[in-house]
Image: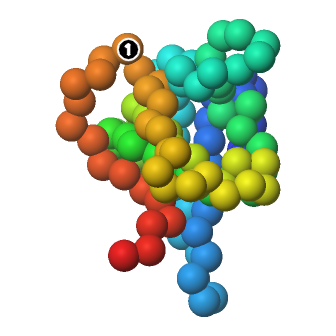
Amino acid sequence: MSNAKGPEGDRLTLTFTKGDKVDAFTGHFETACAVPSSKGGGMMPSDIPEGTVMTVFFNGESHKVEGKKTRDNLILAISFHVWQGQKVEESKRKVYFCTSNHSSTFRFWGNEKR
């Protein structure tokens, strides 16, 4: 995972490398994620350290802007697999919502071994 900070720090870019192929996903949060923190408030993409391994749950939409197709991915929730270099045990993983709508249909993008 790499963390790409936009002007407001609201964009997140995840990368996955398998062999010589690199795949990337970029999205933004609807609201701050409900991740507990000592500083209070919610977690924004700019708060996620580079090197974090995570799964994101999202809805994506395609739009045409000036004749070019663009994709907008709205991140609805996140779940951490590795946080600050420490593996999060599967039994302790949680899903943190980044939306006020908790009953959505979504897709996920992550590095899950199946």
**Is residue 30 depicted above or below 79 in this figure?**
above
Quadrant in the picture for the N terminus: bottom right
Q: Secondary structure at mark 1?
A: loop
Q: Position of residue 4 (x, y in %)?
A: 72, 44
Residue 106 spot, x, y in % from top left: 27, 41
- Looking at the image, residue 73 sits to the left or right of residue 28; the answer is left
The amino acid type of the residue labelled 1 equals: Ser
Q: Image quadrant of residue 87?
A: bottom right
Q: Residue furthest front?
A: 91
User: Measured from the top left, where is residue 3 in percent x and y?
Assistant: 72, 46
Give left or right: position of 27 versus 106.
right
Q: Nearer the viewer, residue 101 or 113?
A: 113
Residue shown at 44% from the left, 37% from the top? 95
Mark 1 crowd level (few <14, some 14–19, many ≥20, 10 Å Cα): few
Question: Which of the pair 88/61 is nearer the observer?
Answer: 88
Residue 30 in view (yes/no) = yes
Quadrant in which the C terminus appears: bottom left
Colour convention of the picture:
rainbow
The residue shown at (66%, 33%) is 45
Q: Is residue 83 above or below residue 48?
A: below
Vertical arrangement, residue 2 with respect to residue 31, above or below: below
Instruction: Identify which residue is drawn at 62% across, 42% down.
Output: 12
* Residue 72 visible, this angle: no
Q: Residue at x 47, y 25 (%)?
A: 98
Q: Is residue 61 left or right of residue 30?
A: left
The residue beneath circle 1 is 100
Give the image location of residue 2, x and y in percent: 71, 54
Q: Residue furthest bottom?
A: 19
**Figure label count:** 1
In this rendering, the answer to whether 67 lies above or below 45 is below
